[in-house]
Amino acid sequence: IEQFDHLRFHPRYSSTLDCSCENIIVPYQSFISIKPQYHQLCSSDFVTSQWFAHINAAADIYINKDFSYTGGPIFQALASLCNLANNSLTNSLFIFNSTRFISNKVLSEELFIQETQRIIDIFKSKAVEIFIQPLNIIQVMTHSNLLVSGLFTNVQIDINSIYYPDLIVDVRYQNYNNGS
Protein backbone atom coordinates (compact mmCIF):
# COMPACT_ATOMS: atom_id res chain seq x y z
CA ILE A 1 0.00 0.00 0.00
CA GLU A 2 2.83 2.40 0.85
CA GLN A 3 4.53 1.75 -2.47
CA PHE A 4 1.26 2.17 -4.35
CA ASP A 5 0.54 5.49 -2.61
CA HIS A 6 4.09 6.69 -3.24
CA LEU A 7 3.87 5.91 -6.94
CA ARG A 8 0.31 7.23 -7.23
CA PHE A 9 1.42 10.71 -6.11
CA HIS A 10 4.60 10.66 -8.18
CA PRO A 11 4.30 13.06 -11.17
CA ARG A 12 5.60 10.48 -13.61
CA TYR A 13 3.05 7.74 -12.70
CA SER A 14 0.04 9.54 -11.29
CA SER A 15 -2.08 9.34 -14.47
CA THR A 16 -0.78 6.03 -15.83
CA LEU A 17 -0.50 3.90 -12.73
CA ASP A 18 -2.45 0.70 -13.12
CA CYS A 19 -2.19 -2.00 -10.51
CA SER A 20 -4.13 -5.19 -11.08
CA CYS A 21 -5.34 -7.18 -8.11
CA GLU A 22 -4.50 -10.83 -7.57
CA ASN A 23 -7.84 -11.49 -5.90
CA ILE A 24 -10.63 -9.38 -7.38
CA ILE A 25 -13.41 -10.82 -5.16
CA VAL A 26 -13.29 -10.20 -1.41
CA PRO A 27 -16.12 -10.98 1.04
CA TYR A 28 -17.44 -7.90 2.85
CA GLN A 29 -16.95 -9.63 6.18
CA SER A 30 -13.19 -9.79 5.58
CA PHE A 31 -12.86 -6.00 5.93
CA ILE A 32 -16.16 -4.84 7.52
CA SER A 33 -17.37 -6.14 10.86
CA ILE A 34 -20.91 -5.30 11.97
CA LYS A 35 -21.91 -6.04 15.54
CA PRO A 36 -25.55 -5.12 16.26
CA GLN A 37 -26.60 -3.53 19.53
CA TYR A 38 -30.18 -4.12 20.52
CA HIS A 39 -32.30 -1.99 22.80
CA GLN A 40 -31.88 -2.97 26.45
CA LEU A 41 -35.58 -3.81 26.63
CA CYS A 42 -34.97 -6.78 24.33
CA SER A 43 -32.74 -8.43 26.94
CA SER A 44 -34.82 -7.43 29.97
CA ASP A 45 -37.24 -9.43 32.10
CA PHE A 46 -40.13 -7.54 30.47
CA VAL A 47 -40.00 -9.75 27.37
CA THR A 48 -39.86 -13.10 29.15
CA SER A 49 -42.60 -15.66 29.58
CA GLN A 50 -42.24 -15.31 33.36
CA TRP A 51 -43.17 -11.62 33.14
CA PHE A 52 -46.10 -12.38 30.84
CA ALA A 53 -47.39 -14.96 33.33
CA HIS A 54 -47.01 -12.51 36.21
CA ILE A 55 -48.80 -9.62 34.53
CA ASN A 56 -51.53 -11.87 33.11
CA ALA A 57 -52.15 -13.31 36.59
CA ALA A 58 -52.55 -9.75 37.89
CA ALA A 59 -54.98 -8.98 35.06
CA ASP A 60 -57.27 -11.74 36.31
CA ILE A 61 -57.39 -10.11 39.76
CA TYR A 62 -57.89 -6.44 38.90
CA ILE A 63 -60.58 -4.67 36.91
CA ASN A 64 -60.07 -3.90 33.24
CA LYS A 65 -59.09 -0.28 33.97
CA ASP A 66 -55.84 -1.52 35.56
CA PHE A 67 -52.64 -1.50 33.49
CA SER A 68 -52.19 -5.24 33.97
CA TYR A 69 -55.31 -5.78 31.84
CA THR A 70 -53.70 -4.22 28.76
CA GLY A 71 -50.08 -4.57 29.89
CA GLY A 72 -49.72 -8.26 29.06
CA PRO A 73 -50.50 -7.86 25.36
CA ILE A 74 -48.35 -4.71 25.21
CA PHE A 75 -45.32 -6.54 26.59
CA GLN A 76 -45.98 -9.47 24.28
CA ALA A 77 -46.06 -7.03 21.37
CA LEU A 78 -42.75 -5.56 22.54
CA ALA A 79 -41.27 -9.06 22.72
CA SER A 80 -42.51 -9.69 19.17
CA LEU A 81 -40.83 -6.49 17.99
CA CYS A 82 -37.58 -7.59 19.66
CA ASN A 83 -37.82 -10.98 17.94
CA LEU A 84 -38.59 -9.30 14.62
CA ALA A 85 -35.57 -7.00 15.03
CA ASN A 86 -33.32 -9.92 15.91
CA ASN A 87 -34.54 -12.11 13.05
CA SER A 88 -34.50 -9.39 10.41
CA LEU A 89 -31.02 -8.24 11.44
CA THR A 90 -29.73 -11.82 11.49
CA ASN A 91 -31.05 -12.26 7.94
CA SER A 92 -29.59 -8.93 6.85
CA LEU A 93 -26.19 -9.85 8.29
CA PHE A 94 -26.29 -13.24 6.58
CA ILE A 95 -26.92 -11.56 3.23
CA PHE A 96 -24.29 -8.89 3.94
CA ASN A 97 -21.63 -11.44 4.92
CA SER A 98 -22.40 -13.47 1.78
CA THR A 99 -21.89 -10.43 -0.45
CA ARG A 100 -18.56 -9.88 -2.18
CA PHE A 101 -16.62 -6.72 -2.99
CA ILE A 102 -15.39 -6.86 -6.57
CA SER A 103 -12.61 -4.72 -7.97
CA ASN A 104 -9.96 -5.61 -10.51
CA LYS A 105 -7.84 -2.54 -9.69
CA VAL A 106 -6.29 -1.32 -6.47
CA LEU A 107 -8.34 1.54 -5.04
CA SER A 108 -6.87 4.54 -3.34
CA GLU A 109 -7.39 4.63 0.41
CA GLU A 110 -9.81 7.55 0.11
CA LEU A 111 -11.87 5.80 -2.55
CA PHE A 112 -11.83 2.55 -0.59
CA ILE A 113 -13.08 4.35 2.56
CA GLN A 114 -15.83 6.07 0.55
CA GLU A 115 -16.89 2.76 -0.98
CA THR A 116 -16.87 1.05 2.42
CA GLN A 117 -19.04 3.81 3.89
CA ARG A 118 -21.44 3.48 0.95
CA ILE A 119 -21.64 -0.30 1.55
CA ILE A 120 -22.40 0.27 5.26
CA ASP A 121 -25.04 2.91 4.47
CA ILE A 122 -26.75 0.55 2.01
CA PHE A 123 -26.68 -2.22 4.63
CA LYS A 124 -28.31 0.06 7.21
CA SER A 125 -31.10 1.18 4.87
CA LYS A 126 -31.79 -2.39 3.68
CA ALA A 127 -31.86 -3.70 7.27
CA VAL A 128 -34.43 -1.05 8.19
CA GLU A 129 -36.53 -1.91 5.13
CA ILE A 130 -36.46 -5.61 6.03
CA PHE A 131 -37.54 -4.79 9.60
CA ILE A 132 -40.33 -2.38 8.63
CA GLN A 133 -41.85 -4.41 5.78
CA PRO A 134 -43.88 -6.83 7.97
CA LEU A 135 -45.04 -3.93 10.16
CA ASN A 136 -46.27 -2.06 7.10
CA ILE A 137 -48.17 -5.14 5.92
CA ILE A 138 -49.84 -5.50 9.33
CA GLN A 139 -50.71 -1.79 9.40
CA VAL A 140 -52.26 -1.83 5.93
CA MET A 141 -54.16 -5.04 6.62
CA THR A 142 -55.51 -3.76 9.95
CA HIS A 143 -56.48 -0.40 8.50
CA SER A 144 -58.04 -1.84 5.34
CA ASN A 145 -60.08 -4.51 7.10
CA LEU A 146 -61.06 -2.39 10.13
CA LEU A 147 -59.99 -5.19 12.46
CA VAL A 148 -60.95 -4.92 16.11
CA SER A 149 -58.23 -5.62 18.67
CA GLY A 150 -58.76 -8.43 21.14
CA LEU A 151 -59.01 -5.94 24.02
CA PHE A 152 -61.27 -3.53 22.10
CA THR A 153 -58.70 -0.75 22.55
CA ASN A 154 -59.26 0.60 19.04
CA VAL A 155 -63.06 0.75 19.14
CA GLN A 156 -65.85 1.94 21.36
CA ILE A 157 -68.89 -0.27 21.30
CA ASP A 158 -72.25 1.15 22.33
CA ILE A 159 -75.31 -1.02 22.66
CA ASN A 160 -78.29 1.19 21.90
CA SER A 161 -81.01 -1.19 22.93
CA ILE A 162 -80.59 -4.40 24.88
CA TYR A 163 -84.31 -4.94 25.56
CA TYR A 164 -85.41 -5.37 21.97
CA PRO A 165 -84.90 -8.45 19.81
CA ASP A 166 -83.36 -6.34 17.05
CA LEU A 167 -80.20 -5.48 18.90
CA ILE A 168 -78.56 -2.32 17.61
CA VAL A 169 -74.82 -2.08 18.18
CA ASP A 170 -72.86 1.03 17.30
CA VAL A 171 -69.12 0.52 16.72
CA ARG A 172 -66.95 3.64 16.59
CA TYR A 173 -63.28 3.34 15.74
CA GLN A 174 -60.90 5.37 17.86
CA ASN A 175 -59.08 8.28 16.24
CA TYR A 176 -55.39 8.67 17.01
CA ASN A 177 -52.76 11.29 16.18
CA ASN A 178 -54.01 13.14 13.13
CA GLY A 179 -57.57 11.84 13.37
CA SER A 180 -57.07 9.04 10.85
Image (cartoon, rainbow, N blue to C red):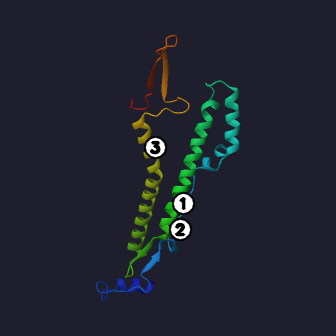
Q: Which mark is residue 123?
A: none
Residue type at mark 3: give it: Ile
Residue type at mark 1: give it: Thr
Q: Is residue 38 above or below residue 176?
A: below
Percent x, y of residue 112: 41, 73
Q: Residue at x 49, y 61 (%)?
A: 92
Please, which residue is most extreme toward the front here?
A: 165
Report, in whole angstroms, how far the alpha carbon at label 3 lies from the one at label 2: 33 Å
Q: Earlier in the sequence, mark 1 or mark 2?
A: 2
Percent x, y of residue 180: 38, 32
Residue type at mark 2: give it: Ser
Q: Is residue 151 above or below residue 94?
A: above
Q: Which residue is mark 3?
A: 138
Percent x, y of residue 60: 68, 29
Q: Nearer the viewer, mark 3 or mark 2?
A: 3
Q: Residue at x 43, y 58 (%)?
A: 126
Q: Which residue is mark 1?
A: 90
Q: Is residue 83 above or below residue 51?
A: below
